Amino acid sequence: MTDQTVEIQLLGSLDQVDPAEWDACACPETAQTGRAIDPFTTYRFLKALEDSGSVGPGTGWQPQYLIARSGGQVIACAPLYAKSHSQGEYIFDHNWAHAYERAGGRYYPKMQIAVPFTPATGRRLLTRPGFDTVGMSALIQGAVQIGSDNGLSSLHVTFCTEAEALAGEQMGLMHRTSQQFHWFNHDYRDFDDFLASLSSRKRKTIRKERRTANAFGGDIRMLTGNDIQPQHWEAFWRFYQDTGSRKWGTPYLTRSFFDLIHETMRDDILLIIAERGGQPIAGALNFIGAETLYGRYWGCIEDHPCLHFEACYYRAIEFAIDSGLHRVEAGAQGEHKLARGYLPATTHSLHWIADPGFAEAVGQYLRAERAAVAEDIEILTAYGPFRKTQAEEQE
């Protein structure tokens, strides 16, 4: 099987690959579970980004999907993009770009294997079962060769799995670590059972925040599947625009993206809407994986104390417990999540730099950064909100 010739292709559109062949690599588990482990690398999600114009001409994310074929079938694929900037990535290389260009080089365009605008860990080197080693090797070697042949500065594989990071490191790529905050489900029966695992002080704080949030004068609705209606997306678009204009200047996603995921992915979505006087005033968008709830976007048109914590963190925890999910990933950044039961977790990326001298400098930086990230995670975990001793509980 592995001695067959592997052919590498670059495709400018997902229209050029059969959806079933892509998903046979991206989410083969759906044949048994019915739900993808990672909803973001499915054909449906990436196609919605493309068809909505959220990626493509004028966005700085130009699709160049990487396909490996052997024996007449797709054995591996990767969401590869030619990037003309470093926005929407969440594992940032702005300093590398500035240093590269100050030295007289041209950093952009670069190549990025990633899910655009999505800081969620998942497989990025998508392989058909039985072709893991040969498929991953073909994708990495193919991408590096394409970058070298075209005089590109670099290749970046962001929010990959730890297994991919270690395999990529063995193939000569540089391994970078970063940090997020994730909530882990230790077989809690309900939210109160989770609260019982926290220190007394943190437990009281969360209960107070939830009371405050739910006193905003309205109701919070948790919607999935056919309970999500087109008018909910109209409201959420207003929320997303508000957040996007404050964080990024211009929202990354277009309005039609939300219509497309409504048509193709609403069973994989948890939309949390806060309504006051019958009108939506805030909302949080989550995607449901087979093991994980992924919090993606929050926005509001009215400010109410603690409503953000309730909609984004506490309702997500409740849904995960009720659904038997293993964890909640609540997006990038945010040490404030620590006090709310979310613990630091390591995220991984891989990097190839064409220039040997610059690669050596980046490699030294990454070695120091990995040590600093590991130390930070150890310290933050020690200061987590969970009960440590019986004496503390009696304070």
Image (cartoon, rainbow, N blue to C red):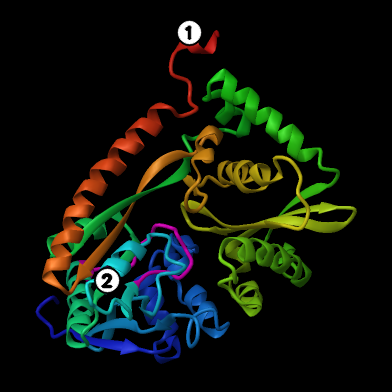
Residue extent of the magenta highlight: 113-132
User: Which residue is drawn at the image coordinates 55% and 8% (left, top)?
Assistant: 394
Q: Identify which residue, 356 or 23, lies in the foreground.
A: 356
Nearer to us: label 1 or label 2: 2
| Residue at which label 2 appears | 102
Q: Which mark is residue 391?
A: 1
Residue 125 included in the magenta stretch of the image:
yes
The vertical placement of 263 against 57, above or below, is above
At horizontal 80% and vertical 58% (from top left) the residue drawn is 280
User: Label 1 sits on what residue type?
Assistant: Ala
Residue 123: x, y in percent? 34, 63
- Identified at 76% across, 66% down, the residue is 235
**Looking at the image, can residue 167 be seen?**
no
Residue projecting furthest to the right = 277
Q: Quadrant of residue 191?
A: top right
Query: Label 1 vs label 2: CA separation?
Result: 57 Å
